[in-house]
Amino acid sequence: MRILMVEDEKLMAKACAEVLRKSYYTIDLVHDGDNGLEYALSDIYDIIILDIMLPKKDGLTILKEIRLAKIDTPILLLTAKDSIEDKVMGLDNGADDYLAKPFHIDELLARIRALQRRKPVLLSEGIIFSDIVFYPELLRLECSGNETILKLKESQILEFLINNRNTVISKNTIIEKIWGYESDAEDNNVETHVSRLRKQLSGIHSRVLISTIRRVGYTLSEGIAEDV
């Protein structure tokens, strides 16, 4: 379960993140609205925890833009305000739940569990790109009757590349999106997983290639399948 938390109170956000990680969630922290929207639009998160009062772009604006992009990720709004008007405005604009600050961490965990139960897991729906069918929830990759099971990081990288198929993605962006905003992962971590993913694609005889754009990053493309 991957969670994005957009919260400008850094100490509070860090404390929440530590508890969530101990509860076996993967969490990315972002502290302003512009970055929060960019991360949310990657559509790689299972739940978004979104503060309303943020620098650069407020939470309600982010919420509206997420829903305009047809992203249905469950969103839990955080705010220091506790008025009926704020609750109604947030829920009417597409939020799934609402939690007023200050809150107890146990209540946050309970709200997250409730959102998990609310969102259906569509295990039967695969993502199609070129000659592959990819099932993120199952970590399964198929091509013309051949299949393989990916490691978690390989699966996340492939999904991110498919979702951004017309863009060259830098190693730094992959680290931030897959390992997390405050991760100590390095370029060689990305290179290792991309190398493994290329071998998995070759092993099922797919013509999908992960092309390296020197000094820029990676992009997904089609070619002739070949052994690695």
Image (cartoon, rainbow, N blue to C red):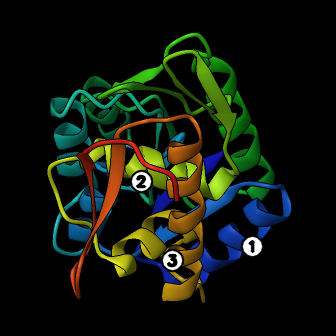
Other-residue count near label 3 (Cα within 10 Å), few / some / many at <14 / 14–19 / ≥20: few
Q: Secondary structure at mark 3?
A: helix
Other-residue count near label 2 (Cα within 10 Å), few / some / many at <14 / 14–19 / ≥20: many
Residue at 17% in and 64% down: 57
Q: Residue flagged by tag 1: what amino acid is it?
A: Glu
Q: Position of residue 133 (x, y in %)?
A: 46, 23
User: Disc 3 designates what residue?
Assistant: 191
Locate residue 109 relative to residue 82 in the image: left or right: right
Nearest to viewer (mark 1 / mark 2): 1
Mark sitting on residue 18: 1
- Quadrant of the drawing holding the N terminus: top right
User: Disc 2 designates what residue?
Assistant: 50
Nearest to viewer (mark 1 / mark 3): 3
Residue 53 visible in image: no
The mark tally for this picture is 3
Q: Secondary structure at mark 2?
A: strand
Residue at 72% in and 54% down: 25
